[in-house]
Amino acid sequence: GVKSIGLNAFCDCKSLKSVVIPEGVTSIGTNAFFGCESLKSVVIPEGDVVISAGAFFGCRSLTSVEIPKGVTSIGWGTFFKCTSLKSVVIPEGVSSIEEGTFDGCTSLESILITDGITRIGANVFARCESLESIVIPEGVESIGLNAFNGCKNLNVIIFPDNYFNEERTMESEKDRLGIPDGTKLVTKSEFSTMCTSIKEIYSGENRFIGKDGKGETKFAGQVLLLCEISK
């Protein structure tokens, strides 16, 4: 059976609409589906799979992708400029998200990063203009330059309690990571405290009401989900 999908295998196949990668494949090569502009869905089998750099670069019709357990590596720029991509789950087993993986995914609204990630590369979420919130899991040791540059609607980033220290402060990281003005940076413990103060959610209005009755602008969106994740 097929064990790998090679370098540039389906590059610029502009009419390709869906792909089911068969079981037994252990490698999706560099730029394998580069520029497949009509590709809407991809099924990746469970198992020990390496997704190489630029594998789905510029697949601008791709709306969602389920990265199954067993994927061990996601290469540089894998989903670069997948402008229709709305949601992604990074499974356990992946240890790093490489540079520019989701750069230019302007429709990305939701990303769940499970435990096991230790490194988030430079520009990983740059220009993800629809992303409103993100939880950085325990175990992340480093985040690359400009990881959140151009995320103009990003309301809150929740960091692990041990992420900040005397040298790596919230203020220094805000500048280094390109985090927009107005984005709240909180630790997991701080956010848990906020969760306990929530009185009411107004759906669709992107805000929550605290005990004082004052609206915290642009903070709700996924706040209930975030409260569950960050327990």
Image (cartoon, grey):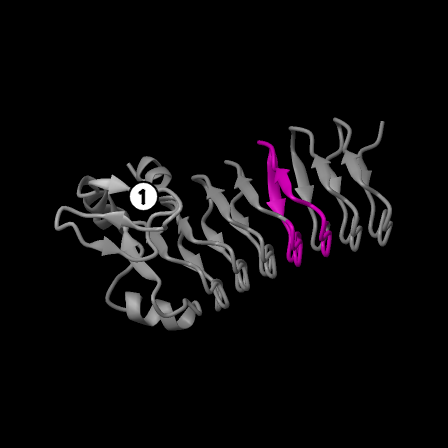
Front residue of this view, candidates 32 and 132? 132
Residue 96 lies in the magenta stretch: no
Compared with 12, 179 (above or below) is: below
Q: Please state the total of marks drawn on the protein image.
A: 1
Q: Residue at x 64, y 52 (%)?
A: 75
Front residue of this view, candidates 18 and 147? 18
Q: On the image, numbered disc 1 is attached to which residue? A: 202
Q: Which residues are magenta?
A: 56-84
Q: Which amino acid type is shown beneath numbered disc 1?
A: Tyr
Residue 61 lies in the magenta stretch: yes
| Numbered disc 1: secondary structure | loop
Q: Residue at x 59, y 55 (%)?
A: 102
Query: Which quadrant of the figure has residue 87?
Result: top right
Q: Is residue 34 left or right of residue 135?
A: right
Main SS class of the magenta portion in the image: loop
Q: Is residue 77 left or right of residue 212?
A: right
Q: Residues within 10 Å of mark 1 (few under 14, many from 20)?
A: few
Q: Residue at x 31, y 59 (%)?
A: 185
